[in-house]
Image: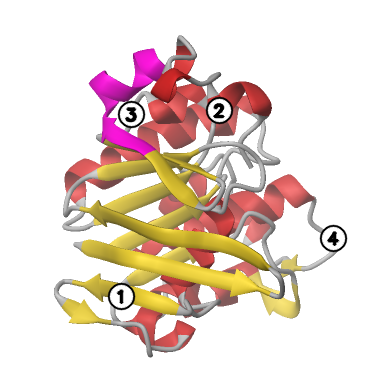
Amino acid sequence: MLVLKDICWRVPEKEILDSVSLTVPDGKCVVVTGPNGGGKTSLAKIIAGIEQPDSGKLLLDGRIINRMSVTERARNGIAYAFQQPVRFKGLTVRDLMELAVGEAMDEDALCDSLSQVGLCAREYIDREVSGSLSGGEIKRIEIATVLARRARLSVFDEPEAGIDLWSFNNLIDVFRKLRSEVDGSILVISHQRRILEIADEIVIISGGRVSAQGSREEMLPRLFDGQTQGRPCPLERGGA
């Protein structure tokens, strides 16, 4: 279980996150949504250890992880998929997958992970994770590395960005399967309704603060009826 308590983070002359508190329980899918520039991606990077909060606490299974590096957090069970995946010239898809899971993978295991995101392993395992692949292909490969890890906490930053409709539809099924089969939890940054519809909990972040949160049943009507705290629906203004 991941717990965030009063997380604050600033860049020069601007408060990005202001006293953000939320919980991602074991076996649950929590979707964080809200308008552009609200702080969602910043929050994901702080959870992964890419950025460090100015104050507040992050606890994974009751252990404070504020001072842990990205590598230490990964070893302790946090997997993170970037909104814009990194390219690695000289590193093959097989190399990247095996680095993610920490061991050698046979072709059946590679095929299983890659097929979940709509890729054929035999066509991709020996290709470099570089400019030879499209943005959508890189995105799907990165999601596959997170799925293969079966981590305690899997964080996906806008997983729908840059992938085709078939892969997106398949990804919804993968999230459901991941939640039911893995002893862990999922945090997704998204404004896509179909992803929101599979959430156990929905959190809206706007202006660096949690403006609303609750169960899917409670939050979906408020989001799409534009009734969240009496203001226009935040998803109508975009949600990066």
User: Closer to the camera: disc 3 or disc 4?
Assistant: 3
Residue shown at the point (46%, 69%) measured from the top left:
8
- In this view, the residue in front, 86 or 54, is 54
- Report whether 216 appears left or right of 79: left
Q: Main secondary structure of the magenta part?
A: helix
Kindly identify which numbered label has been placed on residue 57. Answer: 1
Dot 2 lies on which element? helix
Kindly identify which numbered label has been placed on residue 132. Answer: 4
Q: Real-space Cα distance between discs 3 and 4?
A: 34 Å
Mark 3 highlights which residue? 198
Q: Quadrant of residue 72?
A: bottom left
Question: Residue 14: where, in percent of width, then height?
Answer: 67, 65
Stretch of the chain drawn in magenta: 212-222
Q: Amino acid at mark 1?
A: Lys
Q: Is residue 123 in sight in this rendering? A: no
In contact (CB < 8 Å): disc 1 and disc 4: no
Q: Earlier in the sequence, mark 3 or mark 2?
A: 3
Location of the C terminus by quadrant is: top right
Mark 2 highlights which residue? 234
Dot 3 lies on which element? loop
User: Closer to the camera: disc 1 or disc 4?
Assistant: 1
- Report whether 184 appears left or right of 213: left
Dot 1 lies on which element? strand
In contact (CB < 8 Å): disc 1 and disc 2: no
Q: Real-space Cα distance between discs 3 and 2?
A: 19 Å
- In this view, the residue in front, 196 or 97, is 196
